[in-house]
Image (cartoon, grey):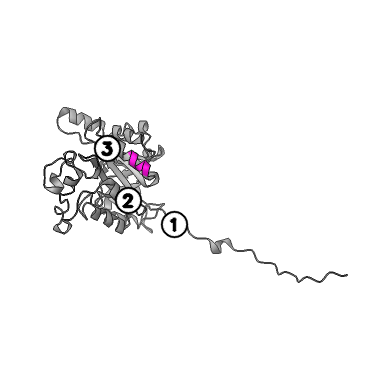
Amino acid sequence: MAESARPRETPRKPSNPRRHRKEPPKAPAVQVHAHRGGAKLRPENTQAAFGKAVELGAHFIEFDVRTCATGELVVIHDATLQRVGGQPARVDQLSLSELQSIDVGSHFDPEYGSERVPTLIEVLETWRNQIRFNIEIKEDTPRGDGTATAVGRLISSMGLYSDVIISSFSPLSLLRARAMTEAPLGLCYPMDGGRGISGRVRDRLMRRPWSAPLLSVYALHPKDALVTAEMVRKAHMRGLAVNVWTVDDPERIAALAGMKVTGIVSDRPDVALQVTQGLDPLQRKAPGLPA
């Protein structure tokens, strides 16, 4: 019996891979770190500032962490409440409840009179998965007060390795944090040398990140005045990111972007974003402009 004739299949045209190809998302030309949340837009180191940074689309919020008298990690820059709260009391001598009874927003504008010093865990839990964190450890003595160890332990327990840079001016603080977590480290410099001959000597020594190789840091966080194209080039050759503080001037931000810095730490993240978002990610310049 003869086999039944099968219909002939029409050969399919090969699909054009270009038809379905999507352009990959562009990486930012420069990552913007909102310094203390954006200290010229909202009261520094407050939830109001961090919310504004998230709203603007900053890549990181940068903030400072200390330990209060009852052992909680709190987000504040100075050792006392004088500048932001009008009270001379030291952070390490106040319980958390005493600390959070103090208004730290009205110094910026009466509109923010309800702002209080947040705890580190409050900040991390509130803004996790919305922005990344540049956490600067504040320890006032070489021996430390437990802040670095506690920060490292908390980052490990929350699994935030890929969302955090732990930074400090103190190499010893970074070493203590490293013992608790594998999160990337950033070495800030130069340290304020203070007064007198010893202060000037220390300032001169700290104008270069001598300890970076020993710490295996991910990034250098230099003061803007120290940054040159040659310095950035040498850092990148060593595999180091370069996040520069604190830069608000649009022309300087554009110049630093042209040097291929990794990040800009700014009190005006709105300005930094406006400048950097208009730059070509590879050329680090505005489209159509000469290099």
Amino acid type for the residue under numbered disc 1: Pro
**Label ID, residue 144:** none
Magenta-colored span: 152-157
Q: Residue 282: percent from the left, percent from the top?
A: 41, 51
Please report contact status of discs 3 and 1: CB closer than 8 Å, yes or no. no
Sequence-wise first label, 3 or 2: 2
Sequence-wise first label, 3 or 1: 1
Amino acid type for the residue under numbered disc 3: Thr
Q: Residue 280: percent from the left, percent from the top?
A: 39, 55
Give the residue pinned by disc 3.
147
Of labels 1 and 2, the one closer to you = 2
Q: Residue 103: percent from the left, percent from the top?
A: 15, 51
**Secondary structure type for disc 1:** loop
Give above or below for 168 relative to 103. above
Q: Nearer the viewer, residue 106 or 211?
A: 106
* Left or right of 17 on screen, residue 268: left
Label 1 vs label 2: CA separation?
A: 27 Å
